[in-house]
Image: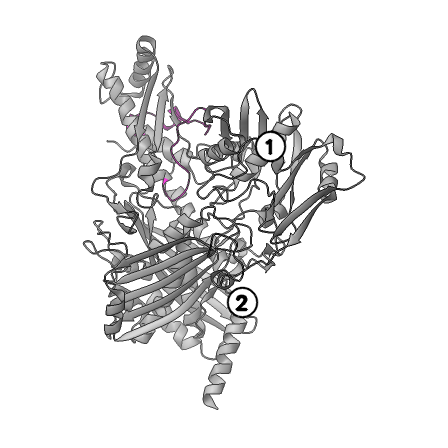
């Protein structure tokens, strides 16, 4: 097959409209007689609702007012556990809990009204930490505050640990992180008994929202319609949360009898919506004297917040990646997601893996030191190879060569020379420099049987003019999926890139191709696009209207004749698992993913010992992601992911006050700007994956996994201080350095 577009950086499908300002986002849209909606939230972390009072001086008769009593279906946000109410009716479980909805045409009066609603609450004991949740200082979910737990074991860890020459134990922590997409959460809804419910929104997963609205309204699925508007970023933050704001807008429209728009301002968006799960990971690792892994015992816990949302699957991915790209014959991972009285944490790029990989890659530097090996040599002795098994018992069939990735990353970063130079120059220097690295992997697609359960579908349809439309629910959220799908389809059909159109995700018009998550869009859905394109062309060939080697003119002519004589020209493809994959949900073992992306990242840092500020001064990212479909988009994915992870590692600290984000503004939630991001040099190694389109694998989540541990390893190389918690803000570094100096002074007394 000729690859005219695959592997080339063609112009983005939606790029022109975005650059020229023609792209229309939710807040650009309007509808006749549309009014605006807002949410009234709790001001306590946990309690019993005693009543709702509406203050004087507000013309309440002009407002649409919605409480839980107005919900026509179930008062729940349907996702996994169905434990989160659409509107709190009896109990409050976090400070941003939605209790009352208001709508009015005057946005200024609406804000006055929001402040005039008073929710009377009897406070109840609340919990705000992983430790308090596990200790059951208050029970807020089930019998033990545990949303989900996994126990994954290979070999015999206890017996192997008893035979280990050296055992190293440590604890690591990561904080919450805000997605900070450019466009805030927003929805427009039209709801009435005759037509049902239609919503337009900024979202990643139309069919998630569809499922939630079916439950809230008790309607049959055909009376619910979800349309994705142009979406200004998501990073996971628009995976599950849009179900809530869509339900709220639709309930207000149902009550008001008019279209309703809800768009959060930045402060409400940051305070009320989901964030990356905070985590605590405890490692106990046994090794031989010559540095071979014998046993890994890992305890991994994430803070789920007040409701389960997607914590179970975030925990799953973090659990599976906790032992990394290494071969160890005996591995045990015990993990749990616990409840606290913070707003629910949820999906964020990397989906649990950045937390567990941070802990592992920091820990392995400590293990290497314990057996007098360099971090590089220790990892090289333990890298997994084809034929060996991961922590889940999955046999690696890919031609994995992590040693070659290390060689490339070290060559591009001048790792060895810099490590030697920094060791000479750092003593006595105020600004100390260091270099560190991390080796890691990330599974593409849903875990285990997840893709089988989704059974994703893609359709293609051709017009008489020879235009081919791709119908899929996979959402363009800035990552370039419209472009990627067009490249794949154009090459498979042998026609021009401009002849491919991507249908707007609309649950009334496109099949369910699954959510836009999990590094699955290009690999899994892209493969369905390619299969459907081959099927469509085959219909034309078998009809006798087209030969295999055709020109574009002949393709257009064949489409016209087919439609004129036979009717619609459509094709359909549905996911089928690659052969030989087996996963056991009960034992949590087997083939966790069809394919993995592999990477080695190197970070160079400068640490000011007066101000305790750490800066990343250079960054090299080397990864193997199968075939690269669009080099510019692929490099952009890596650069953007690294930038986000630099924020996670050094800058982005969520300050909690009684379970509520206290620094929920962009003036005091510090994120890296262009001035804080170093040159990020991106390199790809390509090993085609047999079951991806043209050999492509997933890429989007991988680059968030490795930067934080590489940066912290570099900080330790620069300062000699072992920091086990992120973000490593100046305050945290000052505390760590001061504690180290105090310890050393005490040792000399």
Left or right of 699, for residue 531: left
Tag 2 secondary structure:
loop
Colour treatment of the image: one colour
| Residue at the spot of label 2 | 613
Q: Where is residue 616 in the image (x, y as percent from the top left)?
A: 47, 62
Which span is picked out in magenta? 491-520
Residue 423, percent from left and from top = 39, 75
Q: Name the one closer to the observer, 81 or 740.
A: 81
The local crowd at label 2, few if under 14, some if 14 to 19, many if 20 or more residues have their Cα within 10 Å, is: some
Mark 2 or 1, nearer chain start: 1
The residue that label 1 is drawn on is 251
Horizontal relation, residue 439 to residue 716: left or right: left
Q: Residue furthest left?
A: 387
Which residue is painted at 30% across and 41% down in the image? Answer: 696
Per the model, the C-alpha gap separating discs 2 and 1 is 48 Å
**Is 60 displayed left or right of 399 in the figure?**
right
């Amino acid at each position: 097959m000729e690859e005219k577009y695959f592997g080339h950086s063609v112009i983005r499908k939606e790029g022109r409209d975005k650059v020229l300002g023609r792209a229309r986002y939710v807040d650009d849209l309007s509808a006749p007689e549309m009014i605006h909606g807002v949410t009234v939230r709790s001001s306590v972390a946990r309690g019993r609702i005693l009543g709702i009072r509406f203050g004087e001086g507000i013309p309440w008769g002009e407002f649409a007012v919605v409480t839980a009593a107005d919900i026509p279906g179930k008062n729940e946000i349907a996702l996994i556990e169905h434990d989160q109410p659409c509107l709190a009716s009896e109990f409050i479980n976090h400070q941003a809990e939605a209790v009352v909805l208001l709508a009015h045409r005057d946005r200024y009066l609406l804000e006055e009204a929001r402040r005039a609603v008073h929710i009377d609450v009897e406070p109840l004991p609340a919990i705000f930490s992983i430790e308090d949740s596990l200790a059951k200082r208050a029970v807020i979910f089930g019998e033990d505050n545990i949303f989900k737990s996994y126990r994954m074991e290979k070999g015999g860890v206890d017996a192997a640990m008893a035979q280990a020459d050296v055992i190293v134990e440590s604890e690591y922590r990561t904080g919450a992180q805000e997605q900070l997409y450019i466009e805030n959460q927003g929805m427009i809804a039209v709801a009435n008994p005759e037509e049902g419910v239609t919503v337009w929104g900024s979202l990643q997963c139309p069919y998630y929202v569809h499922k939630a609205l079916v439950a809230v309204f008790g309607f049959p699925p055909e009376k619910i319609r979800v349309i994705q508007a142009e979406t200004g970023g998501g990073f996971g933050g628009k995976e599950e949360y849009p179900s809530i704001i869509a339900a709220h807008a639709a309930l207000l429209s149902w009550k008001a009898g008019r279209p309703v728009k809800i768009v959060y301002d930045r402060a409400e968006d940051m305070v009320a919506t989901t964030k990356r799960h905070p985590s605590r990971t405890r490692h106990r690792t046994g090794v031989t004297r010559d540095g071979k892994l014998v046993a890994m015992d890992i305890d991994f816990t994430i803070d789920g917040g007040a409701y389960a949302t997607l914590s179970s699957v975030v925990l799953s991915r973090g659990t599976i990646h906790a032992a990394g790209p290494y071969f160890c014959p005996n591995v045990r991972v015990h993990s749990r997601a616990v409840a606290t009285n913070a707003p629910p944490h949820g999906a964020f790029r990397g989906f649990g893996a950045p937390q567990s990989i941070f802990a592992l890659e920091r820990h392995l530097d400590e293990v290497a030191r314990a057996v007098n090996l360099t971090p590089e040599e220790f990892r090289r002795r333990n890298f997994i190879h084809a034929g060996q098994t991961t922590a889940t018992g999955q046999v690696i069939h890919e031609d994995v060569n992590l040693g070659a990735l290390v060689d490339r990353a070290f060559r591009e970063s001048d790792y060895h020379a810099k490590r030697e130079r920094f060791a000479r120059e750092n003593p006595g220097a105020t600004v100390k420099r260091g270099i560190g690295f991390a080796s890691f992997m990330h599974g593409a697609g849903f875990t285990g049987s997840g893709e089988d359960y989704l059974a994703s579908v893609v359709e293609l349809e051709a017009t008489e003019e020879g235009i081919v439309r791709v119908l899929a629910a996979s959402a363009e959220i800035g990552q370039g999926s419209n472009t990627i799908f067009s490249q794949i389809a154009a090459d498979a059909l042998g026609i021009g890139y401009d002849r491919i159109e991507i249908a707007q995700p609309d649950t009334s018009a496109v099949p369910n191709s699954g959510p836009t998550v999990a590094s699955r869009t290009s690999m899994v859905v892209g493969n369905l696009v390619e299969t459907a394109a081959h099927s469509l062309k085959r219909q034309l060939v078998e009809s006798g209207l087209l030969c295999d080697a055709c020109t574009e003119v002949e393709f257009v002519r064949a489409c016209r004749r087919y439609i004129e004589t036979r009717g619609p020209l459509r094709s359909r493809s549905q996911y089928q698992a690659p052969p030989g994959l087996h996963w056991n949900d009960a034992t949590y073992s087997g083939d966790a993913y069809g394919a993995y992306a592999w990477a080695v990242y190197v970070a160079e840092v400068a640490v000011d010992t007066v101000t305790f500020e750490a800066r990343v001064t250079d960054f090299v990212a080397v990864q193997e992601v199968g075939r690269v479909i669009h080099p510019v988009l692929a490099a952009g994915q890596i650069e953007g992911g690294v930038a986000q992870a630099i924020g996670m590692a050094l800058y982005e600290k969520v300050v909690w006050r009684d379970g509520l984000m206290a620094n929920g503004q962009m003036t005091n939630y510090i994120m890296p700007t262009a001035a804080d991001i170093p040159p990020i040099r991106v390199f790809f190694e390509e090993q085609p994956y047999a079951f991806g389109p043209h050999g492509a694998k997933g890429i989007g989540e991988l680059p968030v996994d490795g930067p934080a541990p590489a940066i912290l390893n570099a900080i330790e190389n620069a300062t000699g201080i072992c920091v086990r918690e992120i973000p490593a803000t100046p305050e945290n570094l000052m505390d760590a350095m001061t504690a180290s100096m105090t310890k050393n002074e005490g040792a000399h007394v």
